[in-house]
Image (cartoon, rainbow, N blue to C red):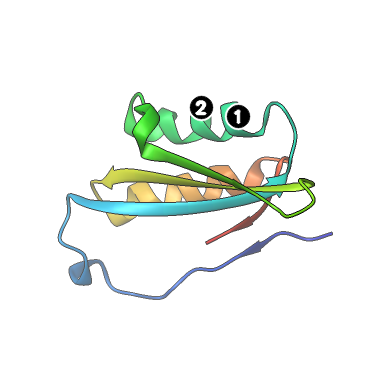
């Protein structure tokens, strides 16, 4: 199954960097999903605090969505995080 990423073609001047930016990541509910995704994001943002992540499970528990709220510093930073998350085999979808 191919990965889908929702990307907007907004210009950087729409954002007032630095700004709070939520990233929603979906995948199968596996023990290493959250840890792996957080490590990828932390590579570009520094250590995440526990209150920066929210986890929701599908009704049958097969899938999980993780919302990570970061302080984005540039459009380039967001693009590189998106690229790295898309490369992760545990990630199915990004919003």
Q: What is the number of the mark on residue 39?
A: 2
Q: Residue at x 25, y 51 (%)?
A: 20
C-alpha gap between disc 2 and disc 1: 5 Å
Where disc 1 sits, the SS reads helix
| Identity of the residue furthest to the right in this view | 1
Q: Which residue is mark 1?
A: 36
Q: What is the number of the mark on residue 5?
A: none
**How many C-alpha atoms fall within 10 Å of the one at disc 2: few (<14), some, or many (≥20)?**
some
Q: Is residue 33 shown left or right of residue 39?
A: right
Q: Is residue 70 shown left or right of residue 26?
A: left
Percent x, y of residue 29 = 74, 40
Q: Nearer the viewer, residue 54 or 88?
A: 54
Q: Nearer the viewer, residue 14 or 23?
A: 23
Where disc 2 sits, the SS reads helix
Percent x, y of residue 65 = 60, 49
Q: Residue at x 38, y 53 (%)?
A: 22
Percent x, y of residue 35 = 58, 26
Q: Residue at x 60, y 29 (%)?
A: 36
Marks 2/1 in contact by CB < 8 Å: the verdict is yes
Position of residue 25 relative to residue 5, above or below, is above
């Amino acid at each position: 199954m191919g990965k889908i990423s929702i990307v907007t073609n907004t210009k950087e001047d729409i954002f007032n960097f630095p700004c709070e930016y939520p990233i929603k990541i979906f995948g199968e509910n596996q023990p290493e999903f959250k840890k792996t995704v957080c490590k990828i994001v932390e590579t570009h943002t520094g250590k995440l605090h526990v209150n920066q992540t929210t986890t929701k499970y599908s009704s049958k528990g097969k899938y999980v969505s993780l919302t990570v709220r970061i302080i984005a510093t540039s459009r380039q930073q967001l693009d590189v995080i998106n690229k790295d998350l898309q490369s992760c085999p545990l990630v199915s979808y990004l919003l």
